[in-house]
Amino acid sequence: MDIQQIIKELKKYFDVRELVSKAVWERMGENAWLLFDPRLLEVLLVLRRDVICVPLVCNNWANGGTMQQRGLRENTCPMVAEKTKAGKMYLSEHTMGRAVDLSAIGKTADEMRELIKQQASRLPHNIRVEDGESAPTWLHVDVRDTGQKVYFFKA
């Protein structure tokens, strides 16, 4: 699938505002889709449609919630800005449009990790998944390629 097809399919499940902060949305609007690595968008589509098969929540600021740093993190978001101000390097996959943190309606983070393990062959790209100790209540997925289909890591 090319990027436009992936975005068209992904829009059945996600509004781009769910994947970016309010600041990014206000600056980029629908063009914010193009800030993401196409591999991440394709993985996100397959996770939602074929592997986890229930609604997934990334950011919820557009619906009155408080979450807006679980997808793309721009340089002005508090998490990145604090590290920069402190002189610390911050090379999270989130800042490069290659990571999302997700919650699911009706599934725990551990249940989602188990589904990914069981159905790894369905994934179109290699992924990294944060383990349950580091991410007890959310699923972190990124497309940094370790050479393994699913690589579990501690943050």
Image (cartoon, rainbow, N blue to C red):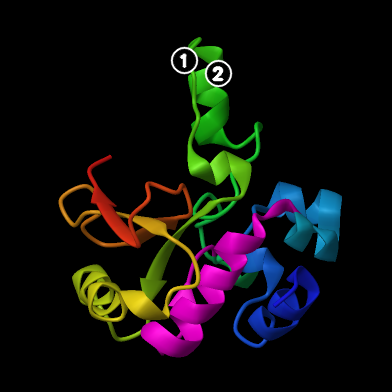
Dots 1, 2 in contact, CB < 8 A: yes
> In the rendered image of this protein, does residue 98 appear above or below residue 12?
above
Residue 38 x, y percent position in the rendering = 66, 61
The answer to whether residue 61 is visible is no
Is 92 placed left or right of 28 in the picture? left
Question: Where does label 2 land, which residue?
Answer: 84
Question: Where does label 1 land, which residue?
Answer: 88
Q: Residue at x 51, y 70 (%)?
A: 43
> What segment carries the magenta color?
35-59
> In the rendered image of this protein, does residue 60 appear above or below residue 134?
below
Task: Tell me which secondary structure the magenta stretch mostly adopts.
Answer: helix
Q: Residue at x 75, y 80 (%)?
A: 5
For mark 2, does the 10 Å Cα neighbourhood hold few (<14), some (14 to 19), or many (20 or more) residues? Answer: some
Q: Residue at x 32, y 74 (%)?
A: 120
Query: What type is the residue that disc 1 sits on?
Result: Lys
Residue 75 x, y percent position in the rendering = 65, 32
The answer to whether residue 106 is visible is yes
Q: Is residue 47 magenta?
A: yes
Quarter of the figure that contains the C terminus:
top left
Query: What type is the residue that disc 2 sits on?
Result: Thr
Q: Secondary structure at mark 1?
A: loop
